[in-house]
Image (cartoon, rainbow, N blue to C red):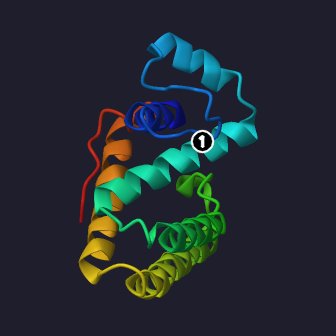
Amino acid sequence: MKKILFTLFILYGFGLNAQRTDYDWKKMDPKQRKEVINNLSPEERKELLKKFRNNMVMDNLNIDSGDKAEFTTIYNEYLENQKKIKNEFDSNFDPETLSDQEAKQKLQQSFDVGQKLLDNRKKYADKMQQVIPCQKVLKLFQSEGMMRDKMNERKPHGSNKAARPRQNP
């Protein structure tokens, strides 16, 4: 799944300057791009992906050039905090094997993490509104949700879960 997302960012960011400016992503064929990416260190790949993601967000939201640096800093902080909060919850467990007490604890923990994610989102929405209009913040969160939904559609689930469509509340 990460490879698909990474490829999407690469395709979107052809004309954008990558970490190494000596690459002309537009003129490379897919095989060449793949080879260059595979030769990057994990840190370089992460930075390249981050840069493409940021450029895609900036273009999608049509952020003024004077606000890009400040917004990028806030946006990256937001994403980093969201990631830290998500890492607080270990979802690698089988609910069927938990006792009632363990299941209650896990459920409460999931609610707590969900609340922290929401609180963080509110906090950074306020910070972002100091730089960009509220409509653009809303558009950002809307596009985040659409991207997450698209990734979940393609994400392979357990063998018997794959055939079952995800139910939205």
Residue 131 shows in the view: yes
Left or right placement of residue 88 versus residue 94 in this view:
right
Left or right placement of residue 39 versus residue 26 in this view:
right
| 87 over 159 or under it: above or below | below
Badge 1 marks a residue whose secondary structure is helix
Find residue 9 and report its horizontal and vertical position in percent: 44, 39
Residue beneath label 1, please?
48
For the residue pair 127 and 119, the one nearer the viewer reads as 127
For the residue pair 149 and 42, the one nearer the viewer reads as 42
**Residue 8 position by quadrant:** top left
| 126 over 5 or under it: above or below | below
Find residue 122 and report its horizontal and vertical position in percent: 43, 85
Q: Residue at x 49, y 78 (%)?
A: 111
Q: Amino acid at mark 1?
A: Leu
**Residue 133 position by quadrant:** bottom left
Q: Residue at x 65, y 35 (%)?
A: 20
**Crowd band around label 1 with a 10 angstrom C-alpha radius: few (<14), some (14–19), many (20+):** many
Residue 157 shows in the view: no
